[in-house]
Structures are given as C-alpha cells and as structure tokens.
Image (cartoon, rainbow, N blue to C red):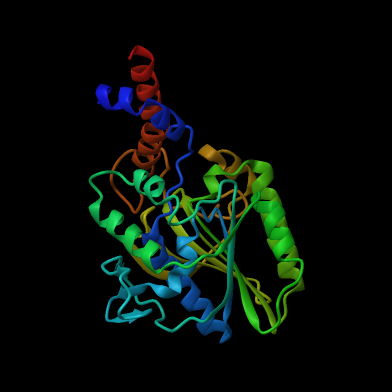
Amino acid sequence: MSRALRAFGRSVAAGMQADVQTNEVGRSAPLSAAMNYLTVAAGLPLRLLEVGAAAGLNLWMDRYFVQAGAAGWGPADSPVRLTGHFTSGQPPATAMTVVDRRGCDLNPLHPTGSRLLLESFIWPEHVGRLRLLRAAVSVAAPVLVERSSAGTWIRQQLATLHAGVTTVVFHSIVWPYLSGDERTALDDAVRAAGARADQDHRLGWVSLEPDRSGVCLTCERWPENERLVLATSSPHGTNVVWQPAPARLEASADRADMPHDHGSGRAGLVARGRNERDTSDRGPCAGGFWYNRKLLTSVFVPEIGRRLLATG
C-alpha cells in the first residue's frame, strides 16, 4: 500500500478530499414502492424532485425492475434487478409515469464521469451493490442535478405546483447530514407548498431516513394532509417490511434529544424502543454500526492515508 501511495500520491491525496456520497441504487426498491403508492392514490403522473441526489441514479427508478413477493414492476428486461429486497407485505405494483425529474446536491456528480469515485464508496465485500451501481449507470441518462442547498432549491422548485401531476419531493439517508436550519428550511418550503395543493396540483413527500426504530419509509401527501409510515428497511433499501400505518410526530423536546437530531420535524416518528446508538445487529438498520462504519471510511481511512503519504 505504501508503494502505491508513493506512486500515485497526488491523485490519492486529491481523492481523499472528496466527501462520501453513496448513491445507493438499492434504495430505489422501497422508494419506487412509495411512488407506486402515490400513483395509485392519485392516478396522476409524477414529477420527481430529489434532495441530495449525488449522481441522480435514484431519479431513474422507473427504469429498474423491482420484485416484491408475487408482484413486480418496472421494465422486465432492465439490467437493474432489485429482487429479494422485500421481506414481508405487498406494496402496490403499478407502472409509474415520470414526466419530469431533477435533483439538487451540494456536490453534484456525473454518473459516468464520476463512476470510479462512486464505486470507491461501496464497501469492497459488497459485490452485489457494486453490480447494481454499474447496471444503473448503464441505463441512466443525463439528468439535471443542480448545485444547491436543500431548502433554497426546494422552495424554488415548489414556487409553482404543476397541474395534472403529483410533484414528489424525496430523499434517502440525507436528513442526518443537514443542519438544523437546513431541515427547517426544507420542512417549511414543503409544508407551505402543501397548503397550496389541490386535487389537480398535488404534492407528496417521501423520505427513507433513520429513526429511533431503524430506517423508516415515510410518505406525506397533500391536499389530503395524510402522513404514513409505509415501511421499514435497512439503510441500503433491503429487508423492507411493507406495513403502512398512520404516523405521528414526536414532541419537539423529544426530537431535540435525538443524536444528530434525526427526524426533527420530518422523520421524528414514534419509536419502538431502539436508539440509533445501539450497535447491535437487531432491527432494520443496526444504526450504531452503520454510522461507525461511515466514520471509519470517511475519517479514519483518509487520515491513515495522509500519514502514510507524510512518512513516504
């Protein structure tokens, strides 16, 4: 390793400046199930707006095939095959129609130009995730991912709700990385737009985010002002338990006590007793292990590399 670092020191040092951006294609399994729910509920095509889109691969979820129990959706010949992600429950299987898709990110990536960087964020033993990423890159087309903060961009995109569609704001494993002010700005922008929604100008908000009980797939829609927890899953979109149930928000004081303020406003759903600092492998996310490993790959490994480069 030291020889490789000496030979490619400059490129390694430059690469270590990059933040970890896991454009996890497996999350399209539960996310697309939520889009199916919105499609069936309103009978309208979708306009997708993704926060923290990275390279925008999950904006192409309608090009991926998903199997859930006896039912499936998406192109049957797609090279991206998300099978075995659902462990129980039966989400609606339908053909969603996407009329517009775009996203924002503080550091947008190009799916082909940044392919090696995206691959470097996948743990080496996760060969299946690597194959999914490469397959997704092969079917993705250019999509607009703008460099912007979440609240500012969503406020701009929701200034007008398009007629005859359901506009859907969505994000996955993004909430922990937003500041409190940014979460508030995003929450305010969506709810202000929701107050303007009507039967022909619909709005949905889908999130796959950590909660005390693991990772929750949450869906809100307007003008119904309905809030549901549709499912729980792992952070990578596997082990999905589809079991829609009404959701209620925790009191603000309770949310303030949560590490990283997970779910403040958005995903602060009533828990079933687990805390995300738990390092056991029980439950859908084994949250403590997941965050510790992120810390390992984003902080400790780069520091080891810097020290090796310094010592030559």
Q: Residue furthest top?
A: 311
In which quarter of the view is residue 63 placed?
bottom left
Q: Quick one: quadrant of the C terminus?
A: top left
* Relative side of 228 to 214, left or right: right
User: Residue 229: image x %, image y %?
Assistant: 49, 65
Q: Residue furthest bottom?
A: 43
Q: Is residue 181 visible?
A: yes
Residue sitting at x 45%, y 41%:
20
Residue sitting at x 34%, y 74%:
65
User: Residue 62: image x %, image y %?
Assistant: 44, 75
Residue sitting at x 66%, y 84%:
164
User: Residue 114: image x %, image y %?
Assistant: 44, 50
User: Residue 233: image x %, image y %?
Assistant: 37, 59
In the picture shown, does residue 231 fall above or below 280? Answer: below
In the picture shown, does residue 186 fall above or below 33? Answer: above
* Relative side of 188 to 73, left or right: right
Frontmost residue, 292 versus 147: 147
In the picture shown, does residue 231 fall above or below 69? Answer: above
